[in-house]
Amino acid sequence: MHRNNCLNNKIISLSILAILTSLLTLTVAAAWEDQPKLGHSMTAVPKQVPAPEFTLEDMDEEQHSLKDLRGKVVLLNFWATWCPPCRREMPSMERLYQKLSGEDFTVIAVNQMEDGDHVFAYIGQLDVDPTFTILFDKDSKVSNSFRVNGLPTTYLIDKQGKIRYRAIGGREFDHPEVEKQIMQLMQE
Amino acid sequence: MKTIHIKLILLVAMAVFIRTPFAANITTQKNEASGLYSWVAESEGFSIELIQLLPDFVRAIYMAHDFPATEVDDIAGYCVFGTVIKNTSLDQLDYDVANWYYTDSAGKDHRIKTKSEWLQQWRKAGVTFSWTLLPDKGTFYEGDWQQGFTTIKLPRESKFNLTYKWSINGTEHTDIFEGLRCAPEQLSEQ
């Protein structure tokens, strides 16, 4: 009887410890994720170069090629679900897409090294479902070809397929400054 | 003769003044919920923030990415900081972590293990995941910023200073981030 009581007490203590550890880990995670305000402009690259070509699959395993988007301005975003600023900027990308998408503009988000199920589960947690195309760069070959060093990194590609603007770190993409840059490219 | 002496003293003073890095303007924050500290150093055109991370948090991150247990234990054995760097200038900023170093409480300098070095080690262990760590090098334009982990090989709760370098439009800058401290193994509440 005494032995059972001891065992129960031990289980209760371990459970409390596990809960406390989880809570503290979450607090640490929250502190790490509560990071700087998102910027609201992209920088014109000093040298306009053609964006590297790629073909990647979306969540339904349909293939998408960048070359098929010639004639459109493309906001190309490299991201992952575990990346705090990527998560923070995603709603603004959706708002931008809702506002400007059409014949002249689109948004492509290239996920890094995660699978469709994982991303699908993540999207289910968002207040607003992203309706722009999400592609899967499972071995980071595409991000390497764009020389992406860290996430998020975003490029603005003009109608001729040249990289015109770049942003490293999170942004509010529906800010008037970014919209103005996109509109200017759309009117070229 | 006296004038020459004064000129010499002035020259030596100027040389010391130019070559000695300054202590950056630092603000310290304690997260009341977790008890962990973070520090922000503001320098000319460059801002760096270091955030204490618990070893269990680091383990959780790498376990979630299916790292082998030995690699998880290895990186969790380091003093890991969440690091946020920002270009606060309007110009081009370049940095290279290979030029940074930390100084322990005994005054000994140590170089930082770079992301490239970690990736080399991880590839040998069959790991292809290449994110989470602060990139070795970067060219930032106006508004660019980056976050990632920085690893310091010191015991828990060790105090140290970080000397970091960057350049703006090719002009090099150096500053010292003083009064940093590694996170404890666990929080005292545990």
Image (cartoon, rainbow, N blue to C red):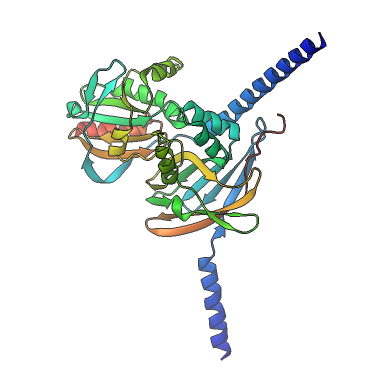
Q: Give the percent coordinates (x, y) of residue A145.
A: 27, 38
Nearer to me, B98 or A98: B98
Number of numbered discs visible in the structure rendering = 0
Quadrant housing residue A1: top right
**Quarter in which the C terminus of chain A is drawn:** top left
Query: In the image, is B123 to the left or to the right of B186?
Result: left
Q: Is residue B27 above or below residue A184?
A: below
Residue occupying the point 32% across, 39% down: A166
Q: Identify the residue shown where x is 47% and y is 58%.
A: B173
Q: Residue furthest bottom?
A: B1
Q: Which residue is rendered at x = 61% and y = 46% of the image?
A: B27
The quarter of the displayed image where residue B167 is located? bottom left
Reply above or below: A80 against B172: above
Name the spot of residue A49 as percent of width and height, x first.
Answer: 22, 42
In the image: residue B187, left or right of residue A120 = right
Instruction: Point out residue B100 in the picture as x, y percentages from the top left corner.
Output: 49, 54
Location of residue A108 (image quadrant): top left
Q: Residue furthest right?
A: A2
> Quick check: can you spot residue B82?
yes
In percent of width and height, residue A90 lies at 40, 25
